[in-house]
């Protein structure tokens, strides 16, 4: 079924930069979200509202795509509604509130969060811009009375815009469902209430008909926050919230990966490692939530505790530079590099380096080869909404399967029960988990990996999209099921 659809996300599926003649060109973005949502916008002739980078100014035309291999190639410029932000506003909104306040708080690291009123005002103002632009996009729909009309808002950068948009749509008597997906964790009430703007965020989200999260834990944290902070009426069993005259349905809809793509490319990706040692592999955005420093120290403990394993393993960590405008992220990079240098200095021999480290982007195609050839996938965030890397590692274990070690403080860790689960904060446990994985016999690796693969193959990215649209189409039925107190 084709439906009228607007996707709203902080970033468009490409950034605009200017070529040597000063003309704007699209630079494609990769990543799970673009892979999932671009085909959806193309199929439905929908619109996409988002920011296209600092180079795009109001007098510029959005160019058409000149790269037929890009996932977003089929999205015409007429389907794009760009958001223009001054550098100063972007800094307050994105580096300030999104990365400096919400990111640490939502990952239950409140002491890293900075709360500043001027930044918050910019966040609200930017959300209003998004709301106004989305309203203009909705007005282009063929039928403004159609019940399947949908706006799908993505992630924590846009948490107050839903209620703004709901009010605009209601005043104009336009029929349109609003849905929201949060890609990061929703913390417990006790953490969330530390945010001085907690009420505004909850009220903003309650402008949606459907509010979806990766896990039941996040969904129930959100319901409890609405109950305790706003005093909303909630039905915990049916997962429905009523506040004023608005009713919202809450759901856990865990995201998956394009499984077949990874499995297929793992068969043809080039061989990345040319050493004989077993590879322990990690790849993450360089972010403090990913637990990279703790992981490196856990590996150090492994080398200390199991000296026989020295020179038989190499830990290969890829850290993708991220949010380099934010001081905490620059400090993290310095600290990580100091730790890697220290540990290498401590254990290296003339023939052997215990850690190899790349601080750069690598393509997902090449990554498929890294995953395939790593004996151990070591994925230990201190907190992570889902973590797609763990799922991608599993999909690429095509022949002699490796062992996944994962932190239970990730969305993925809640269901990947056949992996080795390890608390990322305890170095001894990381050391022991690496040893267990190192020693694990073929039949046990195969048994565990088969079970992990079966689940991820089934609950893949397409399944996620289907479950999302099933939930959207059931919203009106769900709302009737409430028995609120
Ligand atoms: C957020 C939430 C949630 C890896 N290296 C490069 C690269 N990758 C790809 C991986 C993977 C993705 O990036 C990373 O996904 P994660 O899930 O690990 O992490 P976040 O970026 O933090 O994503 C997270 C996710 O949203 C989805 O809802 O799982 O919890 O934090 O697909 O293959 N991509 C590019 N260059 C690289 O060098 N472009």
Image (cartoon, rainbow, N blue to C red):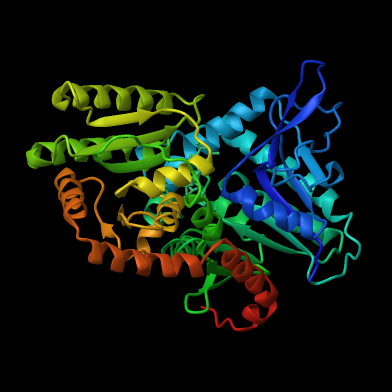
Which quarter of the rendered picture does the N terminus lie within? bottom right
Q: Going by the image, does 250 lie left or right of 225? A: right
Residue 417 percent location from the top left of the image: 31, 66
**Do we see residue 195 in this rendering?**
no
**Do we see residue 469 in this rendering?**
yes
- At 80% from the left and 62% from the top, the residue drawn is 170
Q: Going by the image, does 202 lie left or right of 108? A: right
Q: Going by the image, does 265 lie left or right of 129? A: left
Which quarter of the figure has residue 414?
Answer: bottom left
Judge whether 11 appears above or below 246 on screen: above
Residue 319 percent location from the top left of the image: 41, 33
Residue 329 percent location from the top left of the image: 42, 28
Judge whether 466 appears above or below 282 on screen: below
- At 10% from the left and 36% from the top, the residue drawn is 304
- At 65% from the left and 83% from the top, the residue drawn is 480
Q: Nearer the viewer, residue 304 or 169?
A: 304
Q: Nearer the viewer, residue 261 or 147?
A: 261
Residue 190 percent location from the top left of the image: 37, 54
How many marks are shown on the rendered structure? 0
Q: Nearer the viewer, residue 463 or 50?
A: 463
């Amino acid at each position: 079924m084709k439906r009228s659809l607007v996707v709203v996300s902080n970033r468009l599926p490409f950034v605009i930069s200017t070529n040597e003649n000063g003309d704007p060109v699209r630079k494609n973005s990769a990543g799970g979200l673009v892979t999932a949502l671009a085909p959806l916008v193309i199929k439905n002739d929908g619109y996409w509202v988002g920011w296209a980078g600092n180079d795009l100014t109001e007098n510029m035309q959005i160019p058409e795509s000149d790269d037929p291999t890009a996932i977003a190639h089929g999205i015409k410029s007429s389907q794009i509604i760009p958001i223009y932000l001054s550098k100063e506003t972007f800094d307050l909104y994105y580096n300030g509130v999104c990365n400096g306040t919400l990111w640490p708080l939502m990952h239950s690291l409140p002491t890293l969060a900075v709360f500043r009123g001027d930044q918050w005002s910019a966040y609200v103002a930017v959300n209003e811009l998004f709301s106004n632009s989305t309203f203009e996009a909705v007005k282009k729909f063929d039928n403004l009375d159609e019940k399947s009309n949908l706006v799908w808002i993505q992630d924590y950068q846009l948490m107050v815009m839903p209620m703004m948009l709901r009010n605009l749509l209601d005043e104009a008597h336009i029929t349109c469902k609003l849905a929201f997906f949060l890609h990061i964790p929703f913390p417990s009430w006790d953490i969330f209430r530390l945010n001085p703007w907690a009420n505004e965020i909850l009220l903003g989200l309650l402008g949606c008909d459907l509010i979806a999260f990766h896990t039941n834990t996040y969904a129930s944290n959100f319901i409890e926050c609405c109950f305790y902070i706003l005093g909303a009426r909630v039905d915990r069993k049916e997962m429905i919230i009523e506040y004023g005259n608005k009713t919202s349905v809450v759901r856990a809809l865990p995201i998956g990966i394009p499984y077949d793509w990874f499995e297929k490319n793992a068969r043809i990706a080039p061989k990345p490692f040319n050493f004989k040692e077993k590879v322990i592999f990690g790849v993450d955005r360089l972010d403090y939530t990913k637990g990279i420093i703790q992981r490196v120290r856990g590996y150090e403990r492994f080398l200390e505790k199991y000296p026989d394993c020295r020179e038989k393993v190499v830990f290969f960590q890829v850290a993708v530079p991220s949010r380099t405008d934010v001081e905490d992220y620059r400090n993290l990079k310095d600290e990580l590099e100091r730790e890697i240098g220290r540990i290498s200095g401590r254990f290296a021999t003339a023939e052997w380096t215990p850690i190899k480290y790349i601080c750069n982007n690598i393509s997902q195609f090449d990554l498929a080869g890294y995953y395939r050839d790593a004996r151990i996938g070591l994925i230990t965030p201190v907190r992570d909404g889902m973590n797609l890397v763990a799922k991608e590692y599993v999909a690429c274990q095509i022949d002699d399967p490796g062992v996944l070690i994962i932190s239970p403080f990730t969305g993925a860790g809640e269901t990947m029960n056949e992996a080795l689960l390890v608390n990322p904060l305890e170095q001894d446990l990381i050391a022991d988990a690496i040893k267990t994985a190192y020693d694990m016999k073929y039949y046990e690796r195969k048994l565990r990996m088969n079970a992990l693969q079966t689940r991820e193959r089934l609950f893949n990215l397409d399944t996620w999209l289907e479950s999302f649209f099933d939930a959207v189409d059931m919203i009106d039925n769900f709302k009737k099921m409430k028995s609120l107190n």
